[in-house]
Structure formats: structure tokens, C-alpha cells
């Protein structure tokens, strides 16, 4: 299981998705000078620990990220069934594309009422996870071709 490169890619994808759940995506300063932090679950004021906005879009993006994390882990342990692994990776890619779109929309609405803001490294984690999942799909396809070629030789 661990000796296959796609397992490493899927594990790293799960790791980046898990980090996305906890790290801030962006930080900003309001017009009044107060700091604001954007996470996957909404906007928060670190000074008062109050949530400024946690609309449905934030919860949908968070829920989809948890689903992507669970799918990555299920895919890792489904190493005996490569066609199913590939299908789960396709579902994971589609969900990650939706998460990327939702996060782009959320961060765009986050920046509007602020005087200054900056993205953190965690804001690119969904894209990194997407790339790693695509690499895992490529590794699964290579394994499947190898197994089929060995079956043909017998």
C-alpha cells in the first residue's frame, strides 16, 4: 500500500485538505483598524473570537472539504481495487474544483469591506490537493496498465 507513489500523493492530498480545515486563508484589516481572519468556516475577529460571518457558503465549502478528506483516506485504503480508486479520485477532483470555486467566491467577498488584506499559504492548499489527486490518478492508471500487460503475457 505505502510502496505505491499514488498512496503518497493521496496522503499528501489528505494532509493539505486537513490543514485547510484549521489554518486561516487570509487576514485583513477593517476600515476601523481591527484585524479580521478568514477561515474555511467564516470570518473571525481574533481579538474577540467572534464570528463575523459564517454563511451557508462557508459551511458548504467546509463540508465538502471534510468529504474530500474522507474520500482521500478511503481511496488510500482501497488499493486492491484500482478501478474504484480511479473513480473515487475523479469524484475527489470534481469536489476539489467546487471547493476552489467556493473559496474564490468567499475570499472575494471577504476582501470587499476591508481596507487591506493578504492571502496566506493555506489559500492555495485546495489547488495543491487537486494537483496531487491528479498525479495519484495518473499513478493508478499506470498500475492498471502494468497489471493488464502482465495478464496478457500469461
Image (tube, rainbow, N blue to C red):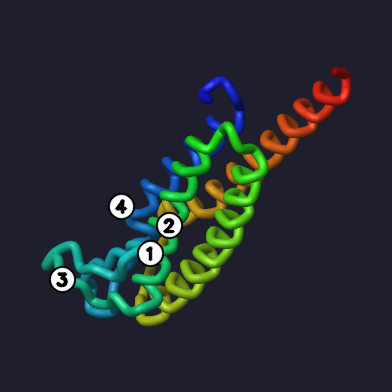
Taking the image as shown, residue 51 lies to the left or right of residue 12, namely: left
Looking at the image, do the residues carrying marks 1 and 2 touch, with CB atoms under 8 Å apart?
yes
Q: Give me the C-alpha separation between circle 1 and circle 2.
A: 6 Å
Residue 8 percent across, percent down from the top left? 53, 30
Q: Going 40% across and 76% down the picture, which residue do you hit? A: 57
Q: Pointer 3 and pointer 2: residues touching (CB < 8 Å)? A: no
* Residue ID at (30%, 52%): 22
Task: Tell me the quarter of the picture where residue 144 sits.
Answer: top right
Whether residue 108 is visible to the viewer of this picture, yes or no, is yes
Q: Where residue 55 sits in the image (x, y, percent)?
A: 32, 79
Instruction: Provide the residue designation for mark 2.
Output: 67
Seen in the picture, residue 145 relative to 110 is either above or below; the reply is above
Circle nearer the N terminus (4, 2)? 4
Instruction: Give the spatial CA distance, label 4 vs label 2.
Output: 15 Å
Residue lying farthest to the front in this orientation: 154
Callout 3: SS = strand
| Residue matched to label 3 | 50
Q: Callout 2: helix, strand or loop?
A: helix
Which residue is labeled 1 in the image? 63
Q: Estimate how packed mark 2 is, as few (under 14), some (14 to 19) or many (20 or more) residues with alpha carbons within 10 Å.
A: some
The answer to which quarter of the image holds residue 81 is top right
Q: Crowdedness of circle 1 by 10 Å Cα count: few (<14), some, many (20+)?
A: some
Q: Mark 1–mark 3 contact, CB under 8 Å?
A: no
Closer to the N terminus: mark 1 or mark 3?
A: 3
Please name which of the two marks, 3 or 4, marks the residue nearer to the observer. Answer: 4
**Which disc number belongs to residue 22?**
4
Amino acid at each position: 500500500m505505502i510502496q505505491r507513489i499514488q498512496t503518497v500523493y493521496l496522503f499528501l492530498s489528505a494532509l493539505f485538505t486537513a490543514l485547510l480545515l484549521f489554518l486561516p486563508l487570509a487576514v485583513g484589516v477593517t476600515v476601523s483598524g481591527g484585524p479580521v481572519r478568514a477561515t474555511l468556516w467564516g470570518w473571525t475577529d481574533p481579538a474577540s473570537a467572534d464570528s463575523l460571518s459564517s454563511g451557508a457558503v462557508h459551511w458548504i465549502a467546509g463540508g465538502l472539504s471534510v468529504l474530500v478528506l474522507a474520500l482521500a483516506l478511503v481511496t488510500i485504503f482501497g488499493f486492491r481495487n484500482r478501478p474504484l480508486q480511479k473513480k473515487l479520485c475523479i469524484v475527489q477532483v470534481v469536489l476539489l474544483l467546487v471547493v476552489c470555486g467556493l473559496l474564490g467566491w468567499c475570499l472575494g467577498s471577504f476582501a470587499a469591506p476591508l481596507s487591506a488584506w493578504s492571502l496566506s499559504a493555506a489559500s492555495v492548499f485546495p489547488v495543491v490537493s487537486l494537483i496531487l489527486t491528479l498525479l495519484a490518478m495518473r499513478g493508478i492508471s499506470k498500475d492498471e496498465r502494468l497489471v493488464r500487460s502482465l495478464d496478457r503475457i500469461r
